Image (cartoon, rainbow, N blue to C red):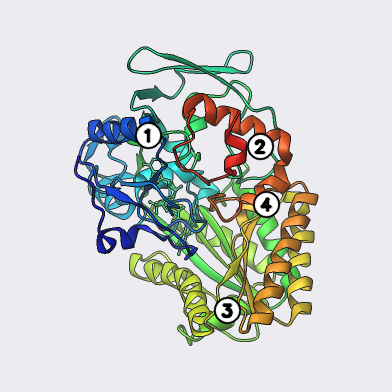
Amino acid sequence: MHAKTQTEDLQNYLTDASNMPGGSAERLFVPETSEQVAEILREANANGTPVTVSGARTGTVGGAIPFGGTVVSLEKLNAIAIDPENRTATVGPGVVLGDFQKEVERVGRFYPPDPTEWSCQIGGTVATNASGARSFKYGATREYVRGLRIALADGDFLSIRRGEAIAVDSVLRVVTENGRAIDIRVPTYQRPNVRKNVSGYFNSDNLDAIDLFIGSEGTLGVVVEATLSLLEKPKGFFSGIVFFEKAKDLLAFVDEARERSRTPGSDIEAVLLEYFDANSLAFIGEKFPETPSGMAGAIFFEQETTSENEDALLSAWNELLEKHNAAQDASWFTTNEQDLAKMREFRHSLPVSVNERVVKNKQKKIGTDMAVPDDKFEGFLRFYKETLDASGIEYVIFGHIGDAHLHANLLPKTEDEATRSRHIYGRCIAQAIMLGGCVSAEHGIGKLKRKYLAAMMGERYLNEMAEVKRALDPRGILGRGNMFGEGFLTA
Ligand SMILES: Cc1cc2nc3c(=O)[nH]c(=O)nc-3n(C[C@H](O)[C@H](O)[C@H](O)COP(=O)(O)OP(=O)(O)OC[C@H]3O[C@@H](n4cnc5c(N)ncnc54)[C@H](O)[C@@H]3O)c2cc1C
């Protein structure tokens, strides 16, 4: 296969949404078939050349940024085959998520994973186990992956169907398409008791091989095809952005909405519960002047509706909001698709405005992605607010409150504030670990969060992860620098 080596061809492939500097590569391949992917890997493996897999590069932790070697972009492996009857789709890794969702909806089906950045590719979402606002009800990408075809570092393939390769006595045996058996020792760490966690390789009792590859950030193999489950397309949605004057009322509302949503048979069954603190509302207010002022925060919720249950549902939410003193007159509700799109835009405009502000400040955003156990959440939010208020640095806190997972974004204006922001980030990580949480709930570890993964896991468990990697990629060519440093890859 012909490699591209010119600077102008490579340039776009040397960075991602993290803006991590220093990316470099000697070669770029854009294969059109799985066999070509295997060929590239065989040669790289023989020469010990590092291979970085590139999706759409919307990742925020530098996972797709190469530091030398070869980049393989899967953008041309973008076939989509939907089977509406059986509610499955088989897709190439380079399929753009937003395009896939539209195709699926055209045939009356629904693919829920929705990391709000719709330009990402299916391969990238599988490799990061992407989640987002709607994961509150529908779960992360993992829930929808039924089958994967993986090109291994030596160019052999693995075809895995969910349920077909399960660990026995802590050993997972997978058999390649060439008939080679590979035994993988399942890591022994306890996973934190949080709703979302993408910090390190997935493990569990009776680990399913497919789950090991999901979220492995391009370090164990290259996803060349995915078979995904689809749902029936919802008939409609009832949505609201509700404002609260007092933070304590907002939190009590979230607690009850979350609890009832998780109770089988309950009338309240939110798809998402998203939080905006007062600073976030001030930010969004610059683009949406109708945003009420003087509020302690807001919640964006959505619930599926049908024409039969719409009225009952509206009254159930009304009652709940009244009980928790929401500023109902100032709040917005809709069942109409156009207004719903506007509400989603309201939500989306926050990270966009934050990024614009950061560029204007000529600084980098420092954004957290930790999650803590539910019962530690309120304390952790208090810690965020007290620490950030005391710093005097501009900040917003927002995100997936239904899953006890918020993003705090610090927006430094000067070098001194940037240095202090990095220290504050470190303190937030330490606090999350102390509370039994994880260092990354949805964005992954990549290259940027390696030292925090090490702080969470400790050397012993990083070594167990490295043993998994060595079983599948003995020369350590794939996703080099993601999750752990090269020191861990030599036996
Ligand atoms: C504004 C914004 C909002 C975001 N919001 C969310 C959110 O709410 N939730 C969330 O989960 N994420 C979020 N993200 C992060 C990002 O969109 C996801 O991580 C996404 O899944 C990355 O997909 P990608 O195609 O861009 O992958 P890339 O960034 O190109 O790659 C990500 C990792 O996957 C590996 N990889 C890519 N393709 C393959 C493959 N075929 N086989 C093996 N490895 C592969 C890469 O090597 C890399 O390690 C957000 C990003 C932005 C910019």
**Does label 3 or label 2 sit earlier along the sequence?**
3
The label on residue 281 is 3
Mark 2: which amino acid? Leu
- Compute the Cα span from label 3 to label 2: 40 Å
- Compute the Cα span from label 4 to label 2: 12 Å
- Compute the Cα span from label 1 to label 3: 53 Å
State the residue position of label 4. Answer: 452
Label 2 crowd (10 A; few <14 / some 14-19 / many >=20): many
**Does label 4 or label 1 sit earlier along the sequence?**
1
Mark 4: which amino acid? Tyr
Asked where in the image residue 65 lies, by quadrant, the reply is bottom left
Label 4 crowd (10 A; few <14 / some 14-19 / many >=20): many
The label on residue 444 is none
State the residue position of label 1. Answer: 47
**Does label 1 or label 2 sit earlier along the sequence?**
1
Mark 3: which amino acid? Leu
Q: Is residue 397 left or right of residue 288?
A: right
Q: Is residue 277 visible?
A: no
Pinpoint residue 371: horizontal percent, then vertical percent.
Answer: 66, 52
Pinpoint residue 150: horizontal percent, then vertical percent.
Answer: 37, 30
